[in-house]
Image (tube, grey):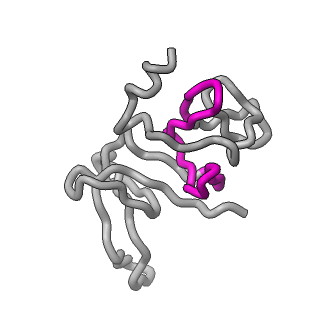
Amino acid sequence: MREIKFRGFSKELNKWVFGQVVKNQSGIPFIVGNVEESNEEYINLHWWRPVAPESLGQFTGLKDKNGKEIYEGDILKHPDRINFVEWNTTYSGGYSCGRYGGIDFQYLEIIGNIYETPELLKENK
């Protein structure tokens, strides 16, 4: 079973944070760390950071050829094309790299993501 975790870009820290995702009453997403203590009335988290909603991505359970964890929104380089990872129910693995499904992700390399480096996709067209 794959580990369920997320990442999001914290503008406050100017870096990616990793953990679970929750939203407040206004719909603002937060990535949160481990639960320190809890009971039926409250929960105390080790840390939490608001993140840019467009940067949220779930861990796919896959790694690239360098052993780096692949998240939704990562831009991957294949020998003959560049595309990004997205959830796609057409393929049994669930994830595809743009319109190319059934790809063995272990042969691809993460070169960026659609949040920080969207220009990589434009260069490929």
- Residue shown at 49% from the left, 39% from the top: 73
In this rendering, is residue 7 above or below 107?
below
Single out the residue that lies furthest toward the left. 12
Whether residue 21 sits left or right of residue 91 in the image: it is left
Q: Residue 90 falls in which quadrant of the image?
A: top right
Q: Residue 118 falls in which quadrant of the image?
A: top left
- Residue shown at 50% from the left, 20% from the top: 124
In this rendering, is residue 27 above or below 67?
above
Single out the residue that lies furthest toward the front. 79
Prevalent SS, magenta region = strand
Is 68 one of the magenta-colored residues? yes
Please state the extent of the stretch shown in magenta in the rendering: 60-84
- Residue shown at 58% from the left, 43% from the top: 109
Q: Position of residue 44 (x, y in %)?
A: 34, 78
Q: Position of residue 119 (x, y in %)?
A: 38, 26
- Residue shown at 43% from the left, 57% from the top: 21
Q: Position of residue 115 (x, y in %)?
A: 37, 37
Q: How many marks?
A: 0
Q: Position of residue 87 (x, y in %)?
A: 62, 37
Q: Residue 30 falls in which quadrant of the image?
A: bottom left
Q: Quadrant of the N terminus?
A: bottom right
Q: Viewer-proximal residue, 77 or 6?
A: 77
In this rendering, is residue 41 above or below 23?
below
Is 43 one of the magenta-colored residues? no
Q: Viewer-proximal residue, 75 or 10?
A: 75
